[in-house]
Image (cartoon, grey):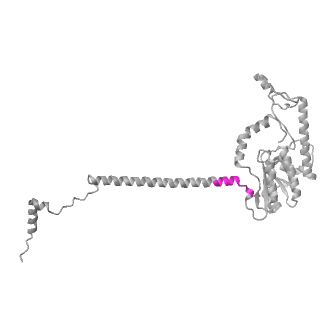
Amino acid sequence: MSEHDPNQHSSSADDAARDPWTSAHAAPVAPPAATESGPGAAGGAWERELINRLAFASLNEQRRARRWSIFFKSLFSIYVLVILIAMFASPKNELAMGKHTAVVEVNGVISEKDRASADHVVGGLRDALKDKNTKGVVLRINSPGGSAVQAGYVYDEIRRLRKLHPDVPIYAVVTDLCASAAYYIASATDTIYVDKASLIGSIGVLMDSYGFVDTLKKLGVERRLMTAGENKGFLDPFSPMKPDAKEHMQQILNNVHKQFINAVKVGRGKRLKENPKMFSGLIWTGEQGIELGLADALGSTGFVARDVIGADNIVDFTEHENILDRFAERVGAALGDYSFRTLFAEPRMY
């Protein structure tokens, strides 16, 4: 066995390198691995990877934005639904546990087209008295008055309901104002409570309008009014007021005033301490009203519920009109209604 020569391998490699035949049949050598910073194919792979990352980032951002959009749209829909439920649901539908005091509001002008219409007030009173847990009813009033007809409807219905439900008292509680038609309604209740600074009374009737006769003449405008019946246009604001027409309307006002006075006398009975000015249309403070017999005592809604009725759990039975109807009435009919009230006279109690 010969001794191994360490230079033998290197000389063989040198011979192979010099021999073209040997070099051609040698094992192929793998090309150098591409690096990220290298040119050619390595550079293309880097760009593709960057584009892929940007594409995925954009896609994720779109998905995230879509999810937030769905979330906020759902939240807004829930909010609108809650608002609609709150608008359309009447407080009287709330669950009242045990005995309670029912409250019905008479708030604002008493008119067929306003919140304090006879239908709303009477509907609330009927619902309150149908409830077996109603121990007493408070008619909470803050109104300057309004239609004599609407007030008469409510007055008559209160007296009828008092006979049908003799064990459930109906009280009136005055906050700021209870005048004219509002007092007409209050006088039908069992007892009237006021604050010492409340204003009550104004037992009278009025009818007002405008006359534009001289204005038209100054403007050179000719009024052309044709009627069938000599008195058909006697309330026309552009024509002179005839003395006999004025006298006729005064008789109507006096008649309605007499109805008002009789209603108050029947409702208040012997509690009323009449004096010459009581039915003149003047108003009185709550304290003065108690002295005159127009009211009975000082007291708020909470006081009456707690200390008079004995049920401090208060449930609102006021009928609230549909929000869409309210919008239509306010926007669509407000100007026409105002024009009718101001230009064409009608008997009112305020």
Identify the image quadrant of residue 240: top right
Query: Image quadrant for the C terminus?
Result: top right
Main secondary structure of the magenta stretch: helix
Residue 278 falls left or right of residue 24: right
The location of residue 1, given as percent across then percent down, is: 6, 77
Task: Find the residue positioned furthest to the top.
Answer: 220
Residue at left 84%, top 29%? 227
Q: Which residues are magenta?
A: 81-92
- Residue farthest toward the bottom in the current orientation of the protein: 1
Q: Nearer the viewer, residue 196 or 265?
A: 265
Count of number-bearing discs: 0
Percent across and percent down for residue 152 are 86, 47
- Give the residue displayed 55% in from the left and 53% down from the top: 72
294 in magenta: no
Locate residue 70 relative to residue 305 in the image: left or right.
left
Q: Quadrant of residue 161?
A: bottom right
